[in-house]
Amino acid sequence: MAFQPAAKLTNRTFVGLIVAQFLAGFNDQALHAAGMFYAIHQGILTEAQAISLMPILFYAPWAIFCTAAGHLADHYSKTYTLIFWKIAEIVIALIALAGFYLGTGQGMAVGAWIVLSTVFLMGTHAAFFAPAKYGAMPEILQPHVLSRGNGILESTTFLAAILGTVAGGMLSFQFRDKEEWIGIILIGLAVFGAVASFLIAYLPAANPTRILPKNIFKPLFENLKVLFTSKPLALSALGIAFFIFMVSYMRATMYMHGQTRNPHWDEFKTSLVVATVALGVALGSPLAGYLSGGKVELGLVPLGCLGMIAATLLAGFEIDHTGMLIAALVIIGFFSGFYMVPLYTNLQHRAPKASKGDLVATSNFINVTGAIAASILFFLLVQASRFVGITPMVPQVDRDAVGSVDSIVRKDKHGPIIELVIDTDEGLNRYYRAKKGSPQPHIDPEDWIEEEVIDFDDDLLEVFSSRLQKGDRVIVSKYTLHGVTHYYLRPEGQPLKPVYNNEGLPRYLFLGAAVMTLVILWLLCRKLPDFFVRTLFWLKSIGTFQLKAVGMQHLPTHGPVLLATNCEGLDDSLQLVSVTDRYTEVVLVEPHVNQNGGLLRKAAMKTSLLLMSGHITPEQWAKAREKALAALNKGDMLAIGVTHPDHDAEIDAFIAQLRAQTGALLIPVFCGPLDPLASKPRVRVVFGDAAPEGATVADLRREINNLADWIRKNDDIAGAVAH
């Protein structure tokens, strides 16, 4: 029997996917970080070069192979795709082990470059694994538990990335000059993850007849067109890309902040501080999934945005207080779960079944573009800050010493220099010691310059050149920053590079992040104008009913749509609106004037609710028709209640005129409780098949009643057949 989507999160397939993807994400980032530190320690890359190169190595495959990754996820069983790449992960870890082993011998540089190549391979692994992982979720879980499942998926994915990054640094520190143990540990984790992937039940291929085109870029452009012409998918893709943009931007901001501390934060401490975001994500994502109930709760997105705005403002104003900064980072992580879970769930749920993997891969391509844009923006903001004086230039004293290197002491055989003696042209031995160095007994104490830091200038174009050696001609300059004197070493003949005081910039970068989040919230509200009405309704209805949408596959993702409903009041109208992922205007016919609703009613009337109550005149119908026509012509949806027989003639004419002028699809929708007397009733919104041309109000009312009868008899299987 073919695998059926599960109604609970405790099923074997979901557990196997979560374990396999967590270990995959952990290994991806652990090897990413360990490879970076290894390249630095081996001397083939400087710290600045490694920080710039590693993201390119890891994320380039996401753009290069996005078409192939999406194609394979749809053409073959997602189960087989996941298992294949988990086994490939073992092979990549074995290659990394070989690189670490070779790096201990004469093939030091070769070994290091082999390790760097595995970062690219792990990026390839992630690029192919992600579309199958996200595309499989709607096949593994029924729609009413998909949000909760995504909460756990996002939480574990983010935790794996953060913990893997921290672990990579810790392993590099613990196994310095014994890095082959890092490879052994990664192999063990990869094997365990591969075993977990065999728990995933067989999922049939979504589109087995599809052929990979010769022009691999053509599907990318076609998928981009699908994403941006579908309003729900465009909303999700834009929101997710912005989040990836912000992750890259904030990470760069935190690294800069760590470098402005006195003393500087090392990579390990910076990673630990950044890792506190994972604590917030671990709390926020599962909670967002739980609070979404049995549907995609887009009303959580504005709440997530507002929380992130408040937290980034707090981080900006309290950036010099590490405790408050960490608290702000936790809050950012918490509310990012509210932001991300609904958007990812909506992308998975609304992408066509035959091309889910393809569209997820295309979304990843957009995400990589967002990450690159963040790097470019960060660079431009740093340059602009120098121009306007936010980061002033630090005065330097050039030629503190000019001469030949006499002796060098490093922290370890590939580590940073901690002691340096220069035989100056004046015939003096100038001794420079880093803070953690120890004085050499043969140096005259009068020549010591203690408790200072040495900075080295390694140009990106000199990646393959030899490192500093005895006899090299050098110049030492110095500058004072934050009360500490820094010594800057460069080859003789190379011009002095300016130094800037970046201490005040991270504050402005955090405040800029708040502004950018506010802008994306505005853009998202442009695509879904009733966003805040959904949020208010969600807040009002917490714990009052269990809402689930059924038959969302009948609801088009673009084009004008008329929804004929049995909704008679504000609450059931908003229940209908809240389960849709497109902007929906509601024509609410109330025979009796109802003043209940307060703030929510006023907000709805300003955005999406057209209320006609009491004695309804022909002028009111004409005005409603004008507004409805404008909405449908924009490609939005319009809902109207058809339960009042007194208005059958007017509603028949209303619907007929709108369909004639817009060609709108007409869909009957039942919305109501299955057990109205329960303390927390089970409310279902059921979308039916499109009504034929010429369908009357009586026909629609009959179909709505049929939907009500069907859901009352089949609610236990509705989740499985709804998708």
Image: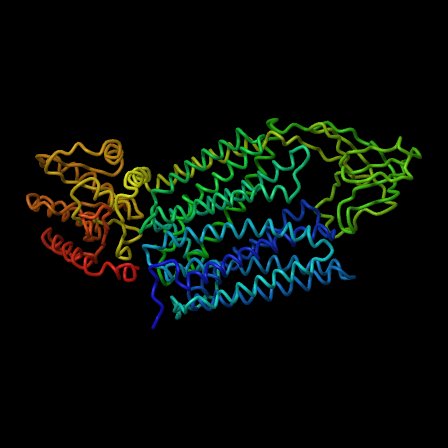
Q: How far across and down, in percent of the image, does residue 291 sit?
A: 35, 46
| Residue at 27%, 33% in the rendered image | 603
Left or right: 322 with respect to 482?
Answer: left
Colour scheme of the rendered structure? rainbow
Q: Is residue 100 above or below residue 405?
A: below
Residue found at the far left of this picture: 646
Residue found at the far right of this picture: 427
Q: Which quarter of the rendering shows the N terminus?
A: bottom left
| Residue at 32%, 56% in the rendered image | 143
Q: How far across and down, in percent of the image, does residue 273 sit?
A: 58, 41
* Nearest the eye: 283 or 249: 283
Q: How far across and down, in percent of the image, does residue 71 sit?
A: 45, 64
Left or right: 605 with respect to 217?
Answer: left
The number of callouts visible is: 0
Q: Is residue 502 above or below residue 415?
A: above
Q: Is residue 295 above or below residue 184?
A: above
| Residue at 75%, 41% in the rendered image | 456
Q: Which quarter of the rendering shows the C terminus?
A: bottom left
* Nearest the eye: 384 or 676: 676
Residue found at the far front of this picture: 679
Q: How far across and down, in percent of the image, does residue 406 sit?
A: 88, 43
